[in-house]
Amino acid sequence: MIRFLMIAVSVMSLGVFTFDRTDTETPATEVTSEPAVTAVEPNFDLSILDVQFCGDTLPLHHSTVAKRYQTAVRFYDHPSFARSRVGAKKKMKQIETILKKHGIPSDFKYVPYIESAMNGEAVSPRGATGYWQFMPATAQGLGLVVNDQIDERKDLIKSTKAAARYLKWLYNELGDWTLVAAAYNAGPNRIIRHMDKQDKDNYFALRLNGETTKYVYRLVAVKEWVNQPERSSTWAKEGTVTKVMTYMKRKREAADVAQALLLASAR
């Protein structure tokens, strides 16, 4: 009992939380309640933690996730990306309409940003081409014409329809949209092997190659810069991750002490 009270005094002296008490006597008929714990107050806007991909909130309370996300946000924090967003609005609308018809979350409309910078003529060193950067065999397997005369990978509408079919197939295989995004980059077989080997089905917990590790973070960063530029600016600032991690640590400490006091009072 004495040890629990010492913990409480130590934490209160650090300003983690305080107890709300009254000086008046409690009437005999009134039921006494446990001391109320004042919530830990952050020194930043908590809304910066509400970053989502396909309806799921990123676990930014983990330092590794927060640091990787900040790196991705900073990667797109430059004028050329800002200019490309303005010129791609019409294409983005077309992509979103097609994805919606196929039941694909609209967040995937940002894939062509990180794959080809929304450039239908983009060609990778390995031969991936077009907005969605399909390899020839993959494109042909999805029904696109790829030969010496025609390359439908460069056609925004046709390639997006093919991408939507592929994304839907990936979801049927993996059952999670974040894993689908990772599989779009690395291939489904590789993602499944990692999941089986590591016995994990959460992208943010999987150990993957460098490119795939960055992929979803960059996809979300593009989405956030387009829709939440102020929040993205906050994440790009030095010190944001430290503030978030400090707040999370204080919350855990406060919760631990509150639990200790609860156990002590029950004795």
Image (cartoon, rainbow, N blue to C red):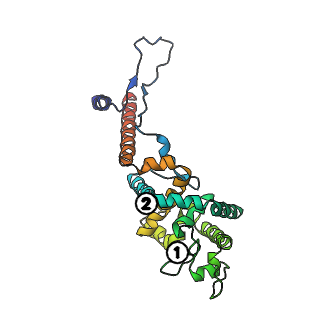
For the residue pair 127 and 91, the one nearer the viewer reads as: 91
Picture residue at 42% right of the left edge, 29% below the top: 38
For the residue pair 182 and 132, the one nearer the viewer reads as: 132
Q: Residues within 10 Å of mark 2 (few under 14, many from 20)?
A: some
Q: Position of residue 85 (x, y in %)?
A: 56, 59
Q: Is residue 122 visible?
A: yes
Quarter assignment of residue 213: bottom left
Q: Is residue 20 above or below residue 193?
A: above
Picture residue at 69% right of the left edge, 61% below the top: 97
Q: Position of residue 116 (x, y in %)?
A: 54, 70
Q: Residues within 10 Å of mark 1 (few under 14, many from 20)?
A: few
Picture disc at residue 177: none
Q: Position of residue 224 (x, y in %)?
A: 52, 53
Report the quarter where the C terminus lies.
top left
Give the side of residue 141 with respect to residue 17, left or right.
right
Give the side of residue 50 with respect to residue 8, left or right.
right
Q: What amino acid type is highlighted by mark number 1?
A: Asn
Q: Secondary structure at mark 1?
A: helix
Check disc 1 and report the residue beneath it.
189
Quarter assignment of residue 3: top left
Picture residue at 37% right of the left edge, 43% below the top: 243
Q: Is residue 147 above or below residue 20?
A: below
Q: Is residue 19 above or below residue 238?
A: above
Picture residue at 37% right of the left edge, 30% below the top: 17
Foreground disc of the pair 1, 2: 2
Q: What amino acid type is highlighted by mark number 2?
A: Phe
Outermost residue toward the right in this view: 101
Q: Mark 1 to mark 2: distance in Å? A: 28 Å
- First-in-chain label (1 vs 2): 2
For the residues bearing labels 1 and 2, Cβ distance under 8 angstroms? no
Q: Is residue 176 visible?
A: no
Picture disc at residue 75: 2
